[in-house]
Every structure is written in C-alpha cells, then in structure tokens.
Amino acid sequence: MANTKVPFLDLKTQYQNIRPEIDEAIARVLDNCQFVLGSEVAAFEKEFATYSGAAECIALNSGTSALHLALLAAGVGPGDEVITVPFTFVASVAAILYAGARPVLVDIHPHTFTMNPSDIEAAITPRTKAILPVHLYGHPSDMDPILEVARRHGLTVIEDAAQAHGARYKECPVGNLGDIACFSFYPTKNLGAYGEGGAVTTGNAEYARTIRMLRDWGQDRKYHHLLRGFNYRMEGVQGAILRVKLRHLDQWTELRRAAASEYNRLLADCGVELPREMPWARHVYHIYTLRTKDRDALQAALQAEGIQTAVHYALPVHLQPAYADLGYSRGAFPQSEKAAEEVLSLPLYPEITDAQVQKVAQALTSLAAAQ
Ligand SMILES: *Cc1c(COP(=O)(O)O)cnc(C)c1O
C-alpha cells in the first residue's frame, strides 16, 4: 500500500471494464464501413441531444471545432467582440480568434473558478456579439445573471461545456442553458472518445442547420457549397464508442462525486481550500481542484510519494506568450492570476479506489501540516 502509485488519470481500467461493448461497437463500424459520420454518429447525436436536454446535437471532430462553428453560426466575425474568461483552457479564447473576432476577457469568481457575472456589464461595447462562459472543472457557470445581461444587450450566449458533461445548473443540464453549447470528447474528458471528438448542442434549428453544413464543407447538398465550410466531421468509430460510453456516464459521474466527497471529508481540516459546489450547482468533478499556498512545493512532495497531480492552469490565457497581443498585462485579472498560482488538481476518475483516495488524502494531510 505504501508503494502504491496513484496516477492522475487511468483510462486503461475503464476500457478493461467495458471492453466487450467497445470492441463490439468498433467491429460494427468496420463491418458497415461508415467511417465518417454515418448511422452510429447520427444515433449518438440523438442520444446526446436527449442527454443534454437540447433539441439538436451536431457531432464534430473536436471541442475546438464546436466552439469555432458555434461562434460562426451565431454570426460572430471580424470587428466583433466576444466576452470570455482568461482562466480556461486556451481553446476557449483561440476559437474566438479563429472566427476573426476579438476576445474580451473578464475575471472569474474565486469560489467557482468561472465567469464573474458582475464583471460582464463593464466589458460590453457596441461591438460585443456574444458571451462565452466556461463550465470549468465540471462546475457550471452562474448562468442566470449571465443570461440576464445577455438578454438585456441582445447577445448570444455560448457555453463552453467541454469539461462539464452531465453538470446541472438549478436542475437544468448544461448544454441547454444558453443559445448554443460546446462539448469536447477528448479522451480524458468525462465523456471521452478513443480519439478526437466534439459536439454542439442547441435548441435553435437555424444554428443547427448552419453548423451541420459548416462541418461538412458548407454543403447543403452534395458538391453544392452554400457556405465556406470545414472538414470538422466526427468519425464513425468515435460515434459508436461514444454511444457505449454515454450509457455509463451517469454512473461514472456518481463515482466521481463519491470520490470528491470522500476527499472533502478526509481533507476538511488539513488547511487547504477545498473545491466548492454552489447550492445551485451539480458539479461533475471533471477535475478536483483545491487551492493551497506553496503549491509547487506541495506538488513536488506528492510526486515524491508516487502521487501524480496536475495544475489547471498555471498561466491564464492573457499571460500566455501566444496571446500577449490581446493587450492585457499582469494584474489585469487578479482572481485568475491568484488561482493560477494556488490551484492543484488531485487524482480523480471513476475507477479510483478508496485506498488510492486515502493514500492521497493522508499524504496531503501530513505534507500540509509540515508546510
Ligand atoms: C478540452 C477543452 C476544449 C477543447 O476541446 P478539444 O476537443 O480538445 O478541441 C475547449 N475548452 C475547454 C474548457 C476544454 O477543457
């Protein structure tokens, strides 16, 4: 037990647990030779739309493509501004630039690590077209005040739900809270393909029609290109795999929540700041992230005990070299910058064992006491 290593993630155990179902699904696609889009992808779209409470789901080749096409469908282009947060995976901001628009950043709320709704109003200009909140770590953004500002100013709301499959805001599933929502099925996400994948969900039939065209070269019928599109299609194998995994998702989410609640119990008095679940939220713990002073030392000490942790994210987007020309400098977003220095993500996945959770909690408790 003392020598058990605890990996940050374990995709292998999950595959072993569902191997017969997955292998059968892959074989089905190889047999029918529908390698791109096809019946498995179409069936997955129906099932994932239902899961997210949305009328439409369009399956794509990545979460980044989902963000890109959601922005284009919303009519975002050169000269427009889109409001999002700097404390996110870089894709949320990059997609706005792909659409030719300018990312305008607002800070996060320190308790949820998501967009602070009270900062939005001041960031709105006549060029603002959309607001793009990110449900970071699997915790939903505080959507009601975001939607209220958006409605008042006539702005489209695009959810970045790449980390939040199955999360809920006031009992409503993410994916149908704003006008359009974007999901990633990158292998490490709560619902992960065995390769790249993503999807858009929306209740807006016009957006859905546009995104369906844009993902497949802008065709409204074969070899007739109504729009300048992209090759953003989902592969058949990924659709078939995602259908299998979607059937397990709620159970996996319960296991994540159970592990998170066990961490919360074991770490309650150890002097680190635990992740919060707001009263209006159902957190799906894509990532279990705490805050601690002297984070780097703690991470190194845990690593020395065989416990793999991660930092999401050490540098907010506005301080990344590639995005220096957005025009923000250090100090622009104090909550994001402080979070970047303090956050530490612990191992958490549906298959994590009680012994592993205990080992992490024990190590952390004794290291934090010594700090
Ligand atoms: C993973 C992720 C994306 C991008 O998804 P890909 O499928 O990797 O392109 C976008 N936004 C957030 C918040 C993510 O975590």
Image (cartoon, grey):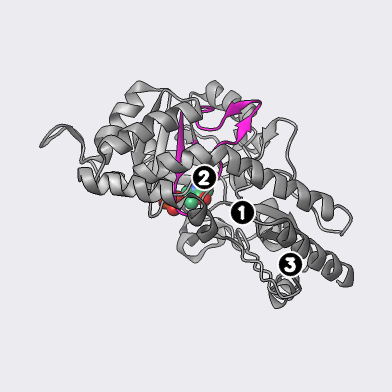
Would you say the residues marked 3 and 2 are in contact, meaning their CB atoms lie under 8 Å apart? no
Find disc 3 in the rendering and name its residue.
295
Which is nearer the N-term, disc 1 or disc 2? 2
Q: Which residues are magenta?
A: 159-187
In-front residue for pair 65/361: 361
Q: CA distance from mark 3 to mark 1?
A: 26 Å
Disc 2 crowd, CA 10 A, few/some/many (<14, 14-19, 20+): many
**Exactly how many numbered labels are in the figure?**
3
Q: Residue furthest front?
A: 20
Residue 104, label in figure: 2
Residue position marked by numbered label 1 in the rendering: 351
Q: Is residue 1 left or right of residue 231?
A: right
| Relative depth, front residue between 245 and 365 | 245
Of callouts 3 and 1, the N-terminal one? 3
**Residue 65 x, y percent position in the rendering:** 36, 46
Q: Nearer the viewer, mark 3 or mark 2?
A: 3
| Residue 168 lies within the magenta run | yes
Name which quarter of the figure residue 109 lies in.
Answer: top right
254 on left or right of 228: right
Which quadrant of the structure image shows residue 242?
top left
Query: In the structure shown, which secondary structural element does the residue marked by tag 2 occupy?
Result: strand
Where's the N terminus, which quadrant? Answer: bottom right
Q: Does residue 178 appear in the picture of this structure?
A: yes
Viewer-proximal residue, 62 or 145? 62
Observer-side mark, 1 or 2, equals 1
* Mark earlier in primary sequence (3, 2): 2
Amino acid type indicated by mark 3: Arg
Q: Is residue 299 above or below residue 350?
A: below
